[in-house]
Structure formats: C-alpha cells, structure tokens
Image: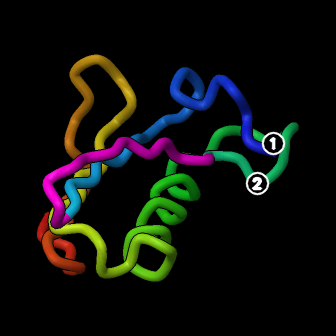
C-alpha cells in the first residue's frame, strides 16, 4: 500500500517533462518493506526503472531526479531516454 505522506518521507523526487508540454513530480519509494530503513539507492533505482522500463517509457522528453529538499541537489538527468548526468 502506498503511504499517504510520501512527499514528506521520500528521499528523492523526479520531475518529468512530457512531450505534450505537461510536467509531473514522482516521489521515490525508499523502503523494501514497512519496517526497513530508508535506502536512497533503492529509491533512485526504482525511479530510473519507472522512467526507462515502466509505464512512462517513451512518453517523456526530460526527467530530472533531485534530493527531496527545498533546494535539493540534482542527482541525475535524463533526456529522450538516455542518462545525461
């Protein structure tokens, strides 16, 4: 089950810009189960899989993964299905 407070507890977020001009923010799922510790690498891996292999494959132009903070650092950037940074 998806936690309702995901934007507050996620360690990373992904801003996706689609070909039609819209954008959407996705938050990482950083735990393998409810009582496990937060794992930033797991969350990033899941976001990348969603972009490159999941339901969003081929629908977006640019995707940027940031730390989920007010002025979060850019961790990864994708352009047309290829990792740039």
- Of the 4 image quadrants, the one containing the C terminus is bottom left
**View extreme (front): residue:** 20
Report the magenta residues as a range. 19-29
Query: Image point 17% across, 61% down: which residue?
Result: 20
> Where residue 72 sits: x, y (%)?
26, 29
In 3D space, how far apart are the residues under numbered discs 2 and 1 (Cα atoms)? 7 Å
Residue 67 drawn at (x, y percent)? 34, 36
Classify 7 as above or below 25: above
Question: Tag 2: Cα neighbours inside 10 Å, few (<14), some, or many (≥20)?
Answer: few
Q: Are marks 2 and 1 in contact (CB under 8 Å)?
A: yes
Vertical position of residue 57 compared to residue 34: above or below: below
Residue 26 is covered by the magenta coloring:
yes
Q: Nearer the viewer, residue 50 or 18?
A: 18
6 is higher (above) or lower (below) than 74: above
Residue 68 locus on image (x, y percent): 39, 30
The residue positioned 81% from the left and 42% from the top of the image is: 36
In the rendering, which numbered label is found on residue 32? 2
Q: For mark 1, what is the residue?
A: 36
Horizontal side, residue 10 vs residue 33: left or right? left
Q: Secondary structure at mark 2?
A: loop
């Amino acid at each position: 089950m998806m936690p309702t407070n995901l934007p507050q507890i996620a360690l990373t977020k992904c801003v996706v810009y689609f070909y039609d001009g819209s954008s959407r923010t996705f938050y990482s799922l950083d735990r393998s189960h409810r009582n496990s510790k937060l794992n930033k690498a797991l969350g990033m891996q899941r976001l990348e899989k969603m972009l490159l292999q999941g339901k969003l494959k081929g629908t977006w132009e640019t995707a940027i993964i940031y730390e989920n903070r007010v002025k979060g650092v850019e961790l990864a950037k994708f352009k047309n299905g290829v990792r740039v940074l």
